[in-house]
Amino acid sequence: MTSIETAFSRQVGIEVPLICGAMYPCSNPELVAAVSEAGAIGVVQPISLTYVHGHEYRAGLKLIRSLTSKPIGLNALIEQSSRIYRERMEKWIEIALEEGVRFFVTSLGNPKWVVRRVESVGGVVYHDVTERKWAQKAMDGGVHGLIAVNARAGGHAGTRTAQQLLDEVRDFGLPVICAGGIGGGASFAASLRMGYAGAQLGTRFIATPECIASDAYKRAIVSAAADDIVLTERITGVPVAVIRTPFIERIGTSIGPLARRLFRGRKTKHWMRSYYALRSFRQLKKASLDERADYWQAGKSVSEITSIKPAAEIVHELASAAAGAIV
């Protein structure tokens, strides 16, 4: 096994600075564990763990722990959408800490309260950012690193290239993870040479035996080219990167003028986000597991993905390819 040492891998205690990004609905326990066991780090998505895969939360974490003793992470969506959700997230974080999780990825809100709690037990927090202003807020919140989501990512992608985004945030002096467009050894090595401390992969790990996504979803990833990835607002109300399919072409990619106006309203935007999120949870759960569905999130890293292969093989191949990169 080829080890690659960066500021990120040292912080988290892993051999290869690769993250299997938290995915709704694809982050099943077996996938998270397989990536960590291979020397990288898998990240738990709590709603996927409980709502999609049907595990009681603590029991799900214990299942992952039974499959690997190596570090795992937890994704914490911390937007202040409701008091009930905030209380649930606080409980999820507490249980994760009790179960030995020490790496957390936050997104959408102010991470200060998560940082304060996680730091108290020696853990680290990285925050998803798509531009400098969000990186500044994360920095002010005390995070230990940044996950820079660029325009080639799947799901909620950014608008900058990997180089542009790194140039915007590197002066903060934190380790930065490249998220978007990494599907093989060449792009992983390129990101490390660029100055990133690691990479986060999502799409590449869907096309694995360990992921319980439908075979149709996996085949679509293998068959797709970068030009087959389009942005649609019809899932969550904001642009999401998906594979162009007959279904996507049929429903279109834009929301209507009324919905757009409500998303911009100070009093209505949170309600709209909650409504679209709940609707998308149901749609994405069905699409990921149903052979007949063709509604699949993916990033432009599909251009490097030519086969379905075990998660450990992916980690080892990327590590070997990047062994000579400047880190």
Image (tube, rainbow, N blue to C red):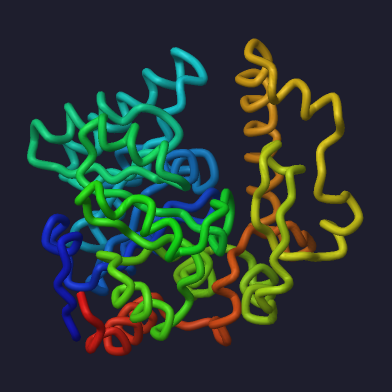
* Residue plotted at (56% across, 59% down): 151
* Residue plotted at (59% across, 70% down): 300
In the image, 207 versus 274, the foreground residue is 274
Any part of residue 277 in sight: yes
Q: Is residue 108 above or below residue 283?
A: above
* Residue plotted at (55% across, 81% down): 305
Task: Give the position of the C terminus as an image quadrant.
Answer: bottom left
Task: Give the position of the N terminus as an image quadrant.
Answer: bottom left
Q: Is residue 152 above or below residue 64?
A: below
Q: Is residue 311 above or below residue 130?
A: below
Any part of residue 69 in sight: no
Where residue 237 appears, x then y in whole percent? Answer: 70, 36
> How many tags in the picture?
0
* Residue plotted at (47% across, 47% down): 130
Residue 5, picture quadrant: bottom left
Q: Is residue 195 left or right of residue 224?
A: left
